[in-house]
């Protein structure tokens, strides 16, 4: 299914970062992604929402090339430098915070870079801490620092705040928004939280049964306010696409 | 529903009404609940059982209930042990035993670790080594003595070789299992940050397998002494095992008790040494355990 979408002049100027054409994935005889055609421009912040089992995580894993075991067809063009922010912070328990952020960094300035990112996420001074001594929010901040330390052109976030409490989640939204503005990667955020998508994203995709059924640009100024009428209309139409009529 | 920005959310005065102070109820008598689990033992609490047994044993020997021909009194054993140390006999036998045990331990642990790494990290290694070690595991070390004597003679080489083969098994099994059991989520992570195979082994596989290695090592340090007791019955003139066997021939139960105490002390000391090392090497776990 192809969807027409109004592009702002700014986004037309930017090159395409992610291009999918008829992307399909399946496990056994069960198709999970059913021919997805999609392009995301460099620097765009895209939120992907959908019910459990709609295929949104499978799409993210396909973009992260973490799906060797799947049956595949269609074409997939993603930047060479991408990094993943998982729902669980996935820190190595035997490595101190700084070593976790430096994981996989090759450059000679890896340490400086990791220290800078730890300062960015507000954890300067915690370099030598063991991951187990951190709170859930702090762990996820270390994971965010580690993802951004890779200097990714594409940041893939798989429900990164799903396991956090509501207050910590609000703080993480603000932090993520600020750091995305600073480092400007293209972002694909998988979430099942419509409000999270509307707070952060430039564009929201809704998935259902392995297809993208709605593709909406969120052309609202930041910080976003739910009291804004356009915001409320968008929210309603997204929820309706998810089968929730509020 | 309205959504406040994080800033508005925290500065909302409604929140400051929740100071959350618990007001103690006046006159509510503190009622100590009966604990559902036993309270923790104080330091040295574990010594209660051993001391109790010692006391009963000493009493039975004093009253003549326990004949010294069957078992010497603890006090007699203490005197005998002291005499043996004054003569330097105990030290001589102890050093001979320790040399065998720890040489065998060192070689066996190194070999077990190397085999586990090869089998855990390569397909060919897994196919070649794992089956062999599993077969070795099924054969008691002591059943290998006849063959070992035919191949290596009755000297030190045979004894150390047998200690090596018995010690490498627990080290191999536990390290190998830990390597195979590395959380797949970490493997995924390693791929997304672009670790090379060598970096993956160094940063993820080895540290992840370390707890398994220590479990194996703790079994190995006690096992090396177990094998020794039997091996020191064969063609030796030195060693704690030899000392105890000779004492049996002469009916010196006090010397046998001294030998048993030496083994017990060695086992406990070795185990605490490994646990101390383990605590240091796995410092990141301290927060979980405590």
Image (cartoon, coloured by chain):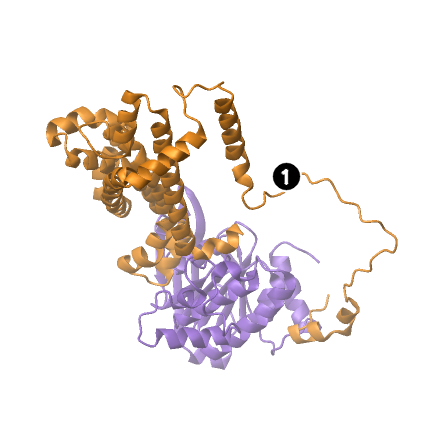
Chain colours: A purple, B orange
Image spot of residue A112 (x, y percent): 39, 77
Q: Nearer the viewer, residue B248 or B41?
A: B248
Q: Label 1 marks which chain's residue?
A: B
Image spot of residue B109 (x, y percent): 27, 44
Q: Nearer the viewer, residue B167 or A1?
A: B167
Whether residue B222 sits left or right of residue B233 in the image: it is right
* Residue linked to disc 1: B38
Query: What kind of element bears circle 1?
Result: loop
Image spot of residue B202 (x, y percent): 31, 58
Q: Nearer the viewer, residue A22 or B5?
A: B5
**On the rendered image, what quadrant is the N terminus of chain B found in?**
bottom right
Image spot of residue A59 (x, y percent): 44, 57
Regarding residue B170, the answer to whether it shows in the image is no
Whether residue B74 sits left or right of residue B169 in the image: it is right
**Residue under the image location 44 percent in, 30 percent down:** B74
Q: Quadrant of residue A218?
A: bottom right
Q: Nearer the viewer, residue B155 or A121?
A: B155
Regarding residue A106, the answer to whether it shows in the image is yes
Whether residue A6 sits left or right of residue B276 in the image: it is right
**Residue under the image location 49 percent in, 73 percent down:** A125
Residue sticking out furthest to the right: B27
Q: Residues within 10 Å of mark 1 (few under 14, many from 20)?
A: few
């Amino acid at each position: 299914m192809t969807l027409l979408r109004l592009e702002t002049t700014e986004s037309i100027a930017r090159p395409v970062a992610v291009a999918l054409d008829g992307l399909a994935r399946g496990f056994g005889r069960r198709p999970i992604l059913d021919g997805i055609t999609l392009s995301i421009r460099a620097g765009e912040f895209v939120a992907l929402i959908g019910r459990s089992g709609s295929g949104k995580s499978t799409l993210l894993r396909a973009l992260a090339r973490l799906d060797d075991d799947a049956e595949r067809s269609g074409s997939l063009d993603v930047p060479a430098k991408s990094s993943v922010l998982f729902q669980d912070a996935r820190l190595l328990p035997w490595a101190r915070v700084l070593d976790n952020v430096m994981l996989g960094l090759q450059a000679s300035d890896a340490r400086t870079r990791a220290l800078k990112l730890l300062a960015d996420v507000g954890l300067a001074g915690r370099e030598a801490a063991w991951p187990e001594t951190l709170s859930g929010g702090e762990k996820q901040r270390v994971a965010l620092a580690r993802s951004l330390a890779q200097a990714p052109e594409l940041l893939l976030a798989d429900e990164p705040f799903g396991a956090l409490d509501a207050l910590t989640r609000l703080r993480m939204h603000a932090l993520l928004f600020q750091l995305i503005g600073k480092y400007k990667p293209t972002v694909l955020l998988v979430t099942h939280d419509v409000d999270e998508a509307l707070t952060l994203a430039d564009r929201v995709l809704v998935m259902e049964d392995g297809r993208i059924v709605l593709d909406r640009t969120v052309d609202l100024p930041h910080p976003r306010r739910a009291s804004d009428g356009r915001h409320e209309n968008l929210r309603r139409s997204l929820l309706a696409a998810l089968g929730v009529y509020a | 529903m309205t959504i406040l920005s994080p800033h508005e959310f925290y500065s909302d005065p409604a929140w400051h009404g929740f100071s959350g102070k618990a007001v103690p109820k006046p006159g509510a008598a503190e009622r100590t609940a009966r604990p559902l689990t036993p309270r923790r033992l104080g330091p040295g609490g574990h010594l209660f059982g051993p001391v109790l047994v010692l006391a009963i044993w000493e009493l039975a020997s004093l009253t003549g209930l326990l004949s010294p021909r069957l078992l010497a009194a603890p006090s007699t054993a203490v005197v005998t042990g002291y005499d043996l140390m004054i003569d330097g006999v105990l030290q001589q036998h102890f050093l001979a035993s320790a040399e065998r045990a720890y040489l065998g331990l060192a070689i066996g642990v190194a070999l077990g670790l190397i085999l586990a790494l090869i089998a855990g990290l390569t397909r060919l290694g897994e196919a070649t080594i794992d089956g062999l070690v599993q077969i070795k595991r099924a054969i008691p070390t002591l059943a290998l003595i006849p063959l070992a004597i035919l191949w290596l003679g009755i000297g030190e080489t045979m004894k150390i070789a047998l200690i090596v083969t018995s010690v490498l098994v627990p080290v191999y099994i536990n390290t190998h299992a830990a390597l195979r059991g590395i959380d797949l989520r970490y493997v995924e992570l390693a791929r997304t940050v672009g670790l090379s195979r060598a970096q993956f082994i160094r940063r993820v596989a080895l540290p992840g397998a370390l707890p398994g290695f220590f479990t194996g090592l703790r079994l190995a340090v006690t096992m090396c002494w177990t094998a020794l007791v039997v091996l020191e019955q064969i063609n030796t003139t030195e060693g704690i095992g030899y000392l105890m066997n000779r004492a049996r021939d002469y009916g010196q139960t006090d010397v046998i008790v001294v030998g048993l105490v030496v083994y017990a002390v060695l086992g406990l000391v070795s185990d605490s040494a490994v646990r101390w090392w383990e605590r240091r090497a796995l410092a990141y776990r301290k927060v979980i355990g405590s």
